[in-house]
Amino acid sequence: MTRFSYTLGQRRYAFDDLTALMARASSPKSGDQLAGIAAGSDEERVAARYALADLPLSSFLDEALIPYEVDEVTRLILDGHDRNAFADIAAFTVGELRDWLLSYETDDAALARVAAGLTPEMAAAVSKLMRNQDLILVAKKRSVVARFRNTLGLPGRLAIRLQPNHPADDARGIAAAMLDGLLYGAGDAVIGINPVSDSVSKIIALLELVDEVRRRFDIPTQSCVLGHVTSTIEAIERGAPVDLVFQSVAGSEAANRSFGIDLALLGEARAAALSLERGTLGDNVMYFETGQGSALSANAHHGVDQQTCEARAYGVARHFAPLLVNTVVGFIGPEYLYDGKQITRAGLEDHFCGKLLGLPMGCDVCYTNHAEADQDDMDNLMTLLGVAGCNYLMGVPGADDIMLNYQSTSFHDALYLRQVLGLRPAPEFESWLEKMGVMQEGRRLLHIDERHPLVTAQLPAGLP
């Protein structure tokens, strides 16, 4: 039985259920086309958006896109829904929510009040009715602040994850990239290493390397080695200096199971990190990465479009009060986001949905070398995200991650974006940069030479 329909001209378009309506209303994505759920034409997409605009928001509380009985993410979203926060917008349709979000009167405080009343599906639905500029405008209004050893997400600030990956987990190569990034003012979001090996002993050695550098120079930041959550829990049990617990998460129970996780395991990891009490300003101890297409790639999307699955991953992240959430927007490849235009749209959608749900959103503005994209596309997206108030971006030496084999953004890109938009590092980190003579009033100093203490730093004793 047809549930939704809309007539354009002489043609009536029918959509069997809410899942189909959401998929047809989505912006073009190669992943949805691969799954056979995308609109067959631009006209069908427009018809779906008209029908979606007239849908009451409460419909998403009455009809789960992935059945409640078979999916713990659905249960988390619906059981945790705050009806008091929803009250102000409960009578809205999806189209009326869009109008309210864009109105001059709706400010940061108003968005914060309703955040817990919005489900990920509501956020995804309204984003499907928005142009890129709409996504930027609303996200810019919302400041989501998180704290561990510094303060991230304040207006007028842009933090950078310093990503010193090495294809052999070589301590000297990692240390060199780390010190290079610090000299360019990167590292306030986190100094985060993707290890080649998920060996717990190797993860502990890398944690000790970063922590030694952090303590030696009294850097007000946090570190993370992005191993599997089970490895990090074991590292904590073995006394490792763990600041943040990392894990990739997705928007369905089955997709998370493909990552080797469930909600209970994430809760265990958060409790273990909190028990260490290593944060000085706050206790946001979780770091999550996501990306459109992850559920589809695991055949765990239940027919739901990839952007809505991504928003549901933010429902998982929100439950654990993270310091960092990062959509790795172009990493999964052209099978899911074909070219620079699709990557750009996905990055703006993800940032908007995350901010709307109250998450401290960052973005890895990136692509793989077999995608129809280049660094100009990345320049465009990172600039748009800077305008939109993104909490943080990536800092990779030369923008070329030779371990993960993909293209991202560089330390130099961070300087460009801070300069052109008048953005500054996290306040505590900025004070440290000024004390170290690396920056002054948010600008990098150019007279650093070989005598600077960061340049002359030696590897910690006992490391190769």
Image (cartoon, rainbow, N blue to C red):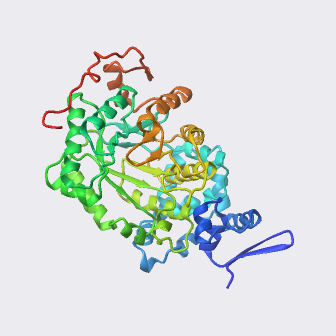
Vertical relation: 33 (above or below) 188: below
Is residue 118 among the parts visible in the rendering?
A: no
Q: Is 86 on the left-hand or right-hand side of 198? A: right
Q: What quarter of the picture does the C terminus occupy?
A: top left
Residue 125, image x and y in percent?
60, 62
Q: Residue at x 23, y 44 (%)?
A: 207
Is residue 73 among the parts visible in the rendering?
A: yes
Q: Residue furthest right?
A: 10
Q: Nearer the viewer, residue 407 or 414?
A: 407
Vertical relation: 450 (above or below) 116: above
Q: Residue at x 13, y 37 (%)?
A: 462
Q: Is 8 on the left-hand or right-hand side of 141? A: right
Vertical relation: 86 (above or below) 413: below
Q: What quarter of the picture does the N terminus occupy?
A: bottom right
Vertical relation: 308 (above or below) 420: below
Q: Nearer the viewer, residue 88 or 271?
A: 271
Q: Is 454 on the left-hand or right-hand side of 77? A: left
Count every numbered label the image shows and give the total: 0
Residue 443, image x and y in percent?
45, 21
Give residue 440's quadrant in the image. top left
Q: Residue at x 19, y 41 (%)?
A: 208
Q: Residue at x 21, y 46 (%)?
A: 277
Q: Nearer the viewer, residue 428 or 345?
A: 345
Q: Residue furthest bottom?
A: 1
